[in-house]
Image (cartoon, grey):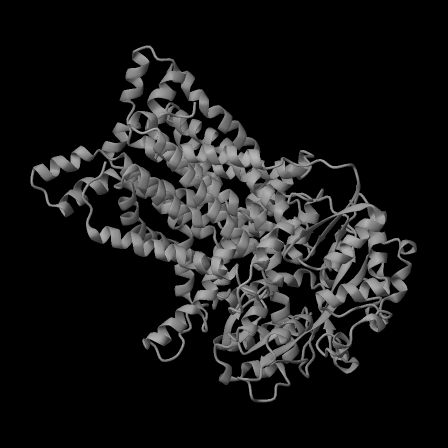
């Protein structure tokens, strides 16, 4: 036992000696970015650091709600954040975002028209789309032989224990609402109740609820059929060629992650400079080529590789895009969604 | 020290070790796997080890994690042990309250601790940094040390300490030569648990971390969405290797100074 | 003398008052508020959040959480006691190694360890392939995303919390008692039940409390190994603060959770310490 104490002391000394305690460099400007993991091409960030003599601190969060809780409590110290669509709306309502100074972002004109003036932020006063996609159905052709066209196909008893749903309240209930012909953001209790009763019938088919590692589950063929975001589908298809993707006939949910600047940002000008830099067609092409999501930049297509341009999961057709609907903030009805979701997941 | 043990005990210990190490073996194995998504074995490589050391994010996170874990463990071990010793002398009426207070950090859900501390730091206008994480970790670690040391003290009795005091030992001498040697295994075990909790904590750290004070768990949670890189497996493998090597070293150094007397020596 | 040494509690007392009691009072305060449409707090005293809890849905989830935690604690105890005993009865060198071997794996990030279990248990994972090769099963078993996987994951995660306190207790035990018992002709099992077990009760109590409380607070295991198909009370608390943005309800749930846990700990502690122990500790 005594030797353990010794060991602890030794360990302590060793680590304290080895660790260079917080290296202090010269005072550079810093840009604190708070976003999803691996959301940028590292080289693109490095180029920006060199061109502007600025140090980028890039920290990660795992979901919108974590981001909100942190920004809402204040004093987080970030200059640029990337909330999703409905979260932009919430943050605007809660007065957490600074209006963007468009004069600093001339490249804004490059943004695809379809992504300008989204319902969650008309006139792009506070946000600019960074990446967008649609929720559809991914399925493995090895196991799923019937043609998949509708959300109702998930209910097929043949797929017992092989369906994976996103672990996301609004997405899943929204999906069932769509299947039953309602809006994915309804505030009507009756419609929500119908959708959830329907989902309870789907439970025997459900292998798991998963958002973060659903891709791995499909690649490794643990599940045969799943709700999936289009960009993720492209990622999965690269590792498992049997996986196909379809936007169901009832339509899917469209989402976008956006650039936004918190109200208490210390370096708003630099954040805007960064946004403008990222929206340069060449930079944009380089960036999205690496991260593999669809490029919102209308002028960047010509700089992309042929492989990227031909990827149907990244570049959805206009016809497919027409069938999509944004999730909107449902206000106090969120409580009902939450309660139904708890019922669903605890099987009560 | 050694008493007869049934062979079944040995077999059980072995099975338990296998149970504990099977997933660890997977982690080590996949640190040499070529494929990034680490689903299937696709060939041997050492690339993840080289890229690990070039990955500034991981290295910064590791540095932050170790500084936080070591600082908070040392502080919490001292505070927790003092509390465990002191509580025995507290008036009986206060005992229940003190006990409840010291159990509180273990019982409070992580997210509550994280969010409420974040609110507190904002009210006090303390900027989020590595220090705020350290404060939070000390707060929850104290209890783990306290609980384990108290359990050790509860079966010890006060006779020896009282005898020492009667013989004129100062409180420090009593503590240093009577109490501490007896409770040391409890102190070390408590420290190990505190260290483990600090290394692994995500929820509390997440809320009280500021820009560029990301710890390893925060980094890893962020990575899950895109698939955790095998660099992390490589890092875990190295972590185990270094820990084992350090124990070997400690054992070796102790082995040189043989005999019970040397072993009883404390570092202060 | 006596009064003075009690003062060493003071630093901890001050520390916890500032960084624990004050924030907790804020949480208790929030639990008596209401939320508006956006999730902002309305500063108006009411019991709404507490009333919501007394509902079949949430009570049921809390009950499930308690059942799972008790099961985890029992299994951990059964698995850890012999292991801790084995380690504590080894030579000093082996003790260090034993403790190190048990704890070092838990210095590896918890998520990484849990995902390693996913790799092992999935339908095309190593365990299934091994069983298929051995001919013990004819088609892969669905082990992941079941209650069994959750229970196993919990037990795995909290083993050191049980081993360490029990080790500390056994290490401290007076071995002369066992020798005396054996000299007087007591069988080893009799000696175990009448001497070893009662003497190590404090370690069992501490280990059980640590494992029980940690299990009730853990939800990532349910999400990863259980496929997020069941909810623990801490999932619900988490959602109230994040997704559902209902801080008062989340705060109320936490307050209920903390109080029930403290009461359970107190009762358990009391049940495990006999009158004799209390006399010895000077509590009576």
Residue A339 vertical placement versus B190 (above, below): below
Residue B178 vertical placement versus B26 (above, below): above
From the viewer's perspective, tell me whether residue A24 is left or right of residue C209.
Answer: right
Instruction: Please say whether residue C47 is visible from this viewpoint.
Output: no
From the viewer's perspective, tell me whether residue A188 is left or right of residue C231.
Answer: right
Horizontal and vertical percent position of residue A299: 87, 70
From the viewer's perspective, tell me whether residue C5 is left or right of residue C51.
Answer: left
Choose top left, top right, bottom left or bottom right for residue B231.
bottom right
Horizontal and vertical percent position of residue C33: 61, 47
- The residue depicted at 53 percent of the width and 64 percent of the height is B44
Q: Nearer the viewer, residue C105 or C216?
A: C105
Residue A264 vertical placement versus B91 (above, below): below
Q: Residue furthest left?
A: C185
Q: Quadrant of the N terminus of chain A?
A: top left
Q: Residue furthest bottom?
A: A146
- The residue depicted at 86 percent of the width and 57 percent of the height is A276
Q: Nearer the viewer, residue A115 or B3?
A: B3
Instruction: Please say whether residue B193 is visible from this viewpoint.
Output: yes
Tally of marks: 0
Q: Residue furthest front?
A: B256
- The residue depicted at 30 percent of the width and 18 percent of the height is B162
Horizontal and vertical percent position of residue A171: 64, 69
- The residue depicted at 58 percent of the width and 48 percent of the height is B216
Q: Nearer the viewer, residue A294 or B89?
A: A294
Horizontal and vertical percent position of residue A90: 73, 57
């Amino acid at each position: 036992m005594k030797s353990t104490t010794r060991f602890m002391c030794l360990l302590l000394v060793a680590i304290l000696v080895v660790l260079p305690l917080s290296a202090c460099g010269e005072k550079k400007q810093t840009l604190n970015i708070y976003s999803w993991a691996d959301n940028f091409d590292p080289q693109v960030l490095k180029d920006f650091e060199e061109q502007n003599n600025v140090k980028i601190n890039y920290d990660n969060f795992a979901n919108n709600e974590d981001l909100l809780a942190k920004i809402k409590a204040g004093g987080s110290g970030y200059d640029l954040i990337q909330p999703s669509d409905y979260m932009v709306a919430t943050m605007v309502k809660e007065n957490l975002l600074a209006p963007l100074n468009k004069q600093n972002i001339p490249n804004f004109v490059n943004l695809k028209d379809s992504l300008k003036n989204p319902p969650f932020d008309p006139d792009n006063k506070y946000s600019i789309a960074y990446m967008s996609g649609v929720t559809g159905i991914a399925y493995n052709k090895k196991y799923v032989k019937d043609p998949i066209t509708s959300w109702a196909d998930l209910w097929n008893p043949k797929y017992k224990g092989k369906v994976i749903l996103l672990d996301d309240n609004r997405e899943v209930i929204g999906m069932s609402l769509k299947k039953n012909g309602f809006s994915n953001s309804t505030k009507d209790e009756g419609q929500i109740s119908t959708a959830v009763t329907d989902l309870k019938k789907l439970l025997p088919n459900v292998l798991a609820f998963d958002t973060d590692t659903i891709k791995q589950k499909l690649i490794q063929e643990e599940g045969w059929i799943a709700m999936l975001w289009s960009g993720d589908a492209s990622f999965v298809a690269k590792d498992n060629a049997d996986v196909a993707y379809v936007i169901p006939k009832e339509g899917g949910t469209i989402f976008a992650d956006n650039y936004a600047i918190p109200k208490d940002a210390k370096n708003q000008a630099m954040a805007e400079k960064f946004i403008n830099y990222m929206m340069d067609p060449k930079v944009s092409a380089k960036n999205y080529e690496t991260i593999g999501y669809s490029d919102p930049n209308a002028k960047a297509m010509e700089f992309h590789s042929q492989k990227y341009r031909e990827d149907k999961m990244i570049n959805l057709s206009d016809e497919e895009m027409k069938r999509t609907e944004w999730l909107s903030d449902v206000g106090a009805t969120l409580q009902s969604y939450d309660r139904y979701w708890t019922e669903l997941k605890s099987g009560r | 020290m050694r008493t007869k043990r049934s062979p079944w005990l040995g077999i059980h210990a072995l099975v338990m070790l296998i149970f504990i190490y099977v997933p660890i073996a997977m982690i080590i194995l996949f640190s040499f796997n070529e494929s990034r998504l680490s689903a299937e074995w696709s060939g041997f490589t050492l690339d993840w080890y080289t890229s690990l050391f070039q990955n500034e994010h991981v290295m910064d996170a590791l540095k932050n994690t170790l500084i936080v874990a070591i600082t908070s463990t040392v502080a919490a071990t001292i505070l927790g042990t003092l509390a465990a010793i002191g509580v025995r002398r507290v008036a009986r009426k206060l005992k229940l309250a003190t006990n409840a207070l010291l159990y509180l950090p273990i019982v409070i859900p992580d997210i509550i601790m994280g969010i409420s501390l974040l609110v507190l730091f904002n009210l006090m206008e303390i900027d989020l940094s590595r220090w705020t994480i350290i404060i939070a970790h000390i707060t929850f670690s104290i209890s783990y040390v306290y609980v384990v040391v108290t359990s050790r003290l509860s079966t010890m009795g006060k006779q020896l300490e009282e005898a020492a005091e009667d013989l004129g030992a100062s409180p420090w001498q009593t503590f240093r030569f009577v109490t501490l040697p007896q409770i040391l295994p409890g102190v070390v075990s408590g420290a190990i648990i505190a260290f483990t909790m600090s290394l692994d904590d995500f929820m509390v750290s997440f809320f009280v971390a500021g820009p560029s004070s990301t710890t390893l768990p925060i980094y890893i949670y962020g990575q899950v969405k895109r698939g955790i890189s095998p660099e992390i497996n490589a890092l875990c493998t190295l972590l185990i290797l270094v820990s084992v090597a350090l124990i070997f070293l400690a054992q070796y150094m102790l082995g040189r100074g043989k005999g019970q007397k040397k072993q009883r020596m404390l570092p202060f | 003398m006596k009064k003075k040494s009690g003062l060493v509690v003071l630093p901890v007392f001050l520390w916890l008052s500032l960084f624990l009691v004050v924030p907790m009072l804020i949480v208790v305060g929030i639990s008596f508020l209401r939320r508006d449409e956006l999730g902002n707090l309305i500063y108006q005293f009411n019991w709404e959040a507490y009333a919501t809890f007394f509902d079949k849905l949430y009570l049921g989830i809390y009950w499930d959480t308690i059942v799972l935690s008790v099961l985890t604690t029992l299994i951990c105890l059964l698995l850890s006691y012999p292991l801790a005993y084995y380690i504590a009865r080894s030579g000093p060198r082996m003790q260090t190694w034993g403790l190190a071997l048990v704890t070092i794996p838990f210095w590896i990030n918890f998520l990484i360890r849990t995902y390693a279990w996913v790799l092992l248990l999935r339908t095309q994972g190593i365990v299934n392939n091994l069983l298929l090769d051995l001919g013990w099963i004819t088609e892969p078993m669905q082990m992941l995303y079941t209650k069994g996987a959750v229970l196993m994951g919990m037990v795995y995660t909290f083993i050191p919390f049980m081993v360490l306190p029990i080790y500390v207790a056994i290490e401290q035990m007076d071995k002369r008692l066992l020798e005396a018992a054996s000299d007087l002709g007591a069988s080893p099992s009799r000696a175990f039940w009448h001497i070893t077990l009662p003497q190590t009760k404090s370690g069992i109590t501490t280990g059980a409390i640590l494992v029980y409380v940690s299990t009730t607070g853990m939800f990532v295991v349910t999400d990863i190994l259980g496929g997020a198909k069941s909810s623990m009370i801490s999932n619900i608390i988490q959602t109230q603060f994040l997704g559902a943005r209902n801080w008062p309800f989340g705060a109320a749930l936490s307050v209920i959770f903390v109080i029930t846990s403290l009461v359970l700990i107190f009762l358990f502690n009391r049940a495990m310490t006999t009158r004799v122990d209390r006399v010895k500790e000077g509590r009576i």
